[in-house]
Image (tube, coloured by chain):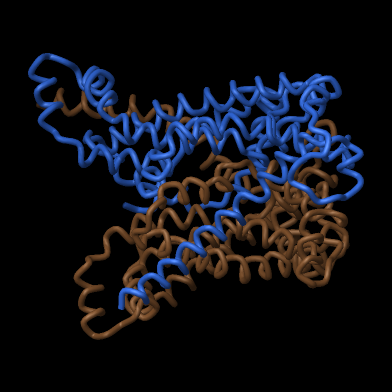
């Protein structure tokens, strides 16, 4: 019996290690390619250790494509603003739907749930025309305003506030705080775990979004990173050493966030998974 | 008392005002506008003009060869990717949940692809799929045939499938992992008393217990895979090539809406067709999974 368990364990470890390798290979290959010279890239030799280790690619991408820092800046501004606005507005909406009584509350909640089911492609074309009419194509607000709320997270925040202890709010009301004062001073600070999970997902969604910027932004000055990366690939199609260096640069910020907050990721997914 | 109710309603609407604003201007308004567009021919040159054409846009779908190719590619992609990514996610989650040492480390590693942007992942894979690239070298090393992954219409879509199964499975794995924590140990103990081995326990205890979660994972998978766009776009530089082999429905909608003139209304009609297909697929899935779903 004991021996059998040992074999089973070894088998499970084999699966885990094998899949870890499968997961890591593309990243390691990209990393190693980003330190190789163009000659080595073109020669097609397969080695994870660069023959002539070089940092030139990293320097060169900023020389060849002067807009890189600008794209990075655009991505940061848009993703950070979208995240902060989502945290605020989704919580406000979730709290109102969980705690306050007002006419039209139920139909509104149903509409928000129904919106979850509509694929983005249906609203994509009219959104373009509306933004065009507003003069918001090629602008930060065109990227930010339509995405500053999110039905999934309104729903998540509502569930969170429904389970929130009422006594705290009642105590705050006795102390003379208004409903809005209670929300901002008492409820919101205590919602930190739910906000952290939400922040990570909204940030990642905005940071990695490809389709919206592709449609809304045509001025290279305003590109976000994924869009910039795609256009960079168009210009330097056989310079895979550059493309990989650029890819690594763009992945690092998210990776750093992940290393610090990885437990919130897991929590957040369990949350959106209906738990 | 009456005054208090009014105040509460006022507060409620105040807190909901940003949501209502975006909901009306960028979601509900556009849905109504999209219905309008689907029945019109839209010209964007100079001033935007709309010409009522009735059901022409919808009728046109039936005769459009590229729409048929796009639908076929998308369906093929969904039918292969959804079961593969679901099974892979379940197996990985069950393995991780077996209580081995180092599972936190493995979980962190497995999750990496989910974090990385689709643009970066697609570029990394294009580089690996290169004719003289890593994947062909690996295939050659174990004696398998090599392919021109990016240029051969027969395999280009498969290349995207492999990449997306690899990058999406970890996300669903985490959902499974959370659900696995809830399975009571007593179920496994009872199975052990009945003489079940590890594989039997997985098959007769774990899999049935997780059925509601599987239903959720499959529905999310269906919605996601039907909307494949980023990877196809970057792979083919927006064309859907080689020879329309990576053309998906969403990529086709994008092309008709923003790349060819005068077909925006037709693109809106296609978008509705896609929404209906996704809805039907979701309903079918719910009908076939016998248990209550979480959704």
Residue shown at 53%/41% (left/top)? B27
Q: Is residue A231 visible?
A: no
In the displayed structure, would residue B288 be above or below residue B1?
below
Q: Colour of chain B?
A: brown
- Horizontal placement of B168 versus B268: left or right? left
In the displayed structure, would residue B53 be above or below residue A232?
below
**How far across and how far down the image is residue B112, in percent?**
55, 45
Q: Quadrant of residue A227?
A: top right
Residue at the bottom extreme of this rendering: B194
Residue at the front extreme of this rendering: A3
Residue shown at 80%/29% (left/top)? A54
- Horizontal placement of A217 versus B137: left or right? left
Q: Quadrant of the N terminus of chain A?
A: bottom left
Residue shown at 55%/54% (left/top)? A20
**How far across and how far down the image is residue A193, in percent?**
32, 34
Give A25 or A214, whichever is nearer the viewer: A25
Q: Quadrant of residue A213?
A: top right
Give B18 or A215, whichever is nearer the viewer: A215
- Horizontal placement of B198 versus B25: left or right? left
Number of numbered markers: 0
**How far across and how far down the image is residue A98, in percent?**
25, 38
Chain with blue colouring: A
Residue shown at 72%/70% (left/top)? B72
- Horizontal placement of A133 versus A39: left or right? left
Give A124 or B181, whichever is nearer the viewer: B181
Q: Is residue A195 visible?
A: yes
In the displayed structure, would residue B7 be above or below residue A2?
above
**How far across and how far down the image is residue A200, in percent?**
46, 35
In the displayed structure, would residue A188 be above or below residue A193?
above
């Amino acid at each position: 019996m004991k021996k059998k368990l040992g074999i089973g364990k070894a088998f499970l470890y084999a699966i885990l290690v094998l899949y870890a390798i499968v997961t890591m290979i593309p990243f390691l290959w990209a990393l190693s390619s980003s330190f190789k010279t163009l000659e080595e890239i073109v020669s097609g030799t397969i080695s994870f250790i660069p023959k002539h280790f070089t940092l030139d690619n990293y320097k060169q991408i900023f020389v060849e494509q002067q807009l890189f820092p600008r794209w990075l800046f655009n991505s940061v501004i848009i993703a950070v603003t979208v995240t902060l606005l989502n945290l605020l507005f989704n919580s406000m909406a979730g709290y109102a739907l969980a705690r306050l009584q007002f006419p039209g509350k139920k139909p509104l909640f149903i509409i928000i749930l129904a919106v979850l089911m509509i694929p983005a492609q249906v609203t994509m074309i009219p959104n373009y025309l509306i933004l065009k009419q507003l003069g918001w194509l090629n602008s930060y607000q065109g990227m930010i305003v339509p995405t500053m709320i999110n039905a999934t997270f309104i729903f998540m925040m509502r569930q969170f506030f429904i389970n929130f202890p009422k006594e705290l709010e009642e105590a705050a009301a006795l102390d003379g705080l208004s409903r809005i004062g209670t929300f901002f001073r008492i409820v919101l600070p205590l919602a930190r775990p739910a906000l952290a999970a939400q922040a990570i997902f909204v940030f990642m969604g905005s940071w990695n979004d490809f389709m919206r910027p592709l449609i809304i932004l045509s001025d290279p000055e305003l590109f976000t990173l994924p869009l910039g990366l795609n256009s960079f690939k168009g210009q330097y199609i056989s310079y895979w050493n550059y493309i990989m260096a650029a890819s690594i640069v763009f992945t690092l910020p998210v990776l750093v966030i992940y290393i610090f907050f990885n437990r919130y990721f897991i929590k957040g997914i369990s949350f959106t998974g209906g738990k | 008392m009456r005054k208090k109710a009014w105040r509460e309603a006022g507060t409620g609407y105040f807190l909901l005002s940003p949501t209502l604003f975006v909901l009306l201007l960028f979601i509900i308004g556009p849905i109504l506008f999209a219905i309008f567009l689907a029945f019109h021919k839209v010209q964007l040159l100079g001033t935007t003009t709309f010409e009522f054409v009735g059901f022409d846009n919808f009728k046109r779908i039936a005769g459009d060869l590229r729409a048929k190719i796009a639908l076929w590619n998308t369906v093929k992609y969904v039918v292969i990717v959804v079961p593969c990514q679901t099974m892979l996610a379940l197996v990985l989650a069950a393995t991780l949940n077996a209580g081995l040492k180092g599972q936190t480390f493995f979980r962190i590693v497995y999750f990496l692809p989910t974090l990385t942007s689709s643009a970066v992942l697609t570029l990394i894979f294009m580089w690996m799929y290169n004719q003289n690239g890593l994947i062909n070298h690996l295939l050659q090393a174990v004696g398998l045939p090599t392919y021109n992954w990016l240029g051969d219409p027969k395999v280009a879509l498969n290349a995207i499938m492999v990449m997306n199964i690899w990058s999406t499975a970890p996300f669903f794995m985490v959902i499974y992992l959370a659900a696995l924590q809830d399975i009571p140990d007593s179920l496994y103990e009872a199975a052990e008393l009945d003489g079940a081995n590890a594989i039997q326990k997985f098959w007769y205890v774990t899999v049935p217990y997780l059925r509601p979660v599987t239903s959720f994972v499959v529905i999310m998978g269906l919605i996601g895979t039907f909307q494949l766009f980023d990877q196809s776009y970057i792979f083919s530089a927006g064309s859907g090539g080689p020879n329309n082999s990576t053309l998906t429905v969403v990529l086709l909608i994008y092309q008709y809406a923003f790349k060819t003139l005068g077909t925006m209304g037709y693109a809106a009609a296609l978008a509705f067709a896609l929404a209906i297909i996704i809805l039907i697929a979701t309903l079918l899935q719910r009908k076939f999974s016998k248990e209550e779903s979480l959704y």
